[in-house]
Amino acid sequence: MKWLPACVVPAVVIAAVIAVPLQAGAAVDLPDKTAEQVLQLVNDSTVSAFSGSVVQSSDLGLPSLDVSAGMAGSMPTDTSDSGSGMSSADALRTALELLSGSHEFRVYVGGEAQSRVQIKDRMAERDLIRNGNELWYYDSNTNEATHLSAPADLAASAQTKFAKLQAQLPTDLSTPALLAERFLAALDPSTAVEVGPDAQVAGRSAYQLLLTPRTAETLVASVSIAVDSETGLPLEVTVLARGQSAPALQIAFTTIDFAAVNASRFDFVPPATATVTEQSVPARPDAPRGDHMRAADVAPVVTGTGWSTVVELPAVAVPAELNDNPLIEQLMVSVDGGRALTASLVTVFLASDGRIFAGAVPLAQLQAAAE
């Protein structure tokens, strides 16, 4: 996590969020550190291997949903040239599941190219495993697996493919370290940063970084990051919404072990009865060619800064299946100029012309951006 800015100043751009209340335990009294010193502690962390249990919970004020509506399976074959193996509709379903209620994860990290995330469901389990140039996603509930393998000479292309699939799965919710990196990588002057009371998380002493927006034009009240006092690894992230006393999103380790992970954890063989979808890495570059630009190549438009940032997705880049998804009908209500989803930490506005606007801001700001 070598992201420390040249000038360490208070701030953050919201990109993803989560947390779990600090665990009760013995009183903690660590040597005093400034905010800059705690940030440096995270930046200097050399932790590359660990395993542990994580609890994630959320209270976003989302309506009750039938997440199975309109879904034929958890990982259908994607015949588009994105090659991700997961459709936009299924990515939405998975994200909504993980952003509702509480969930448990078991995580294993063996370095930059080895990781395994096990999402514990009722009587089932979902696994996302990366082992070098091999990537597996398996859902025991449907007994379906998606596999991506890339030869060594296509390593760069494989990295892009891995990134696309992992971006569609909410893996940032799997560990506090991944989420904290999103916040800390975007430090700028829009946020005040200070050190809060010492804490204990997963039986380990931790410093608390408290991040508070310097603007009222955001739905986020504050973010706290508990940082392991010995290793510098973030152990917990907590996000509070304005006008809401309980954490809106939370993720924290409940147990953690810094011992090397057995390599066998990253070797995955699907059950003999599983339906396996093989995904291939395209030989051609991902850049568009000719006069036709693929939807996946259309970059979003970003306006504003810091906590009031608004992201616009052009209509051409919005998958048709997303607009036709029954979950969208459940989530959104009609408003001036289109439809909107308003949660405690984020607002999404689907304009009548097909464009999508999103941000950690009130609806009126998204409508103004659309106009």
Image (cartoon, rainbow, N blue to C red):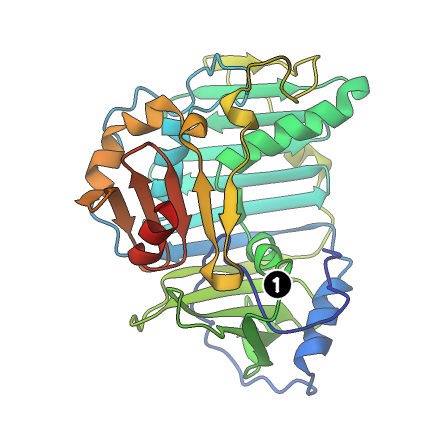
Residue at image position (45%, 15%) is 77
Report which quarter residue 5 is drawn in: bottom right
**Badge 1 amino acid:** Pro
| Image position of 65 with respect to 12: above or below | above
| Image position of 116 with respect to 217: above or below | above
Side of 75 where 2 appears, left or right = right
x and y percentages locating residue 255 in the rendered image = 55, 59
Residue at image position (44%, 34%) is 314
Q: Quadrant of the N terminus?
A: bottom right
Residue at image position (37%, 39%) is 356
Which element carries disc 1, helix, strand or loop?
Answer: strand
Residue at image position (53%, 23%) is 84
Residue that lies at the very extreme toward the left in this rendered image: 334
Residue that lies at the very extreme toward the right in this rendered image: 153
Q: How many marks?
A: 1
Residue at which label 1 appears = 234
Nearer-the-camera pick, 361 or 303:
303
Mark 1 neighbour density, 10 Å: few (under 14) some (14–19) many (20 or more): many
Nearer-the-camera pick, 291 or 280:
291
x and y percentages locating residue 265 in the rendered image = 64, 36
- Work out whether residue 270 can be spotted: no
x and y percentages locating residue 358 in the rendered image = 40, 48
| Image position of 223 with respect to 154: above or below | below
- Work out whether residue 113 can be spotted: yes
Nearer-the-camera pick, 50 or 289:
289
Report which quarter residue 360 is drawn in: bottom left
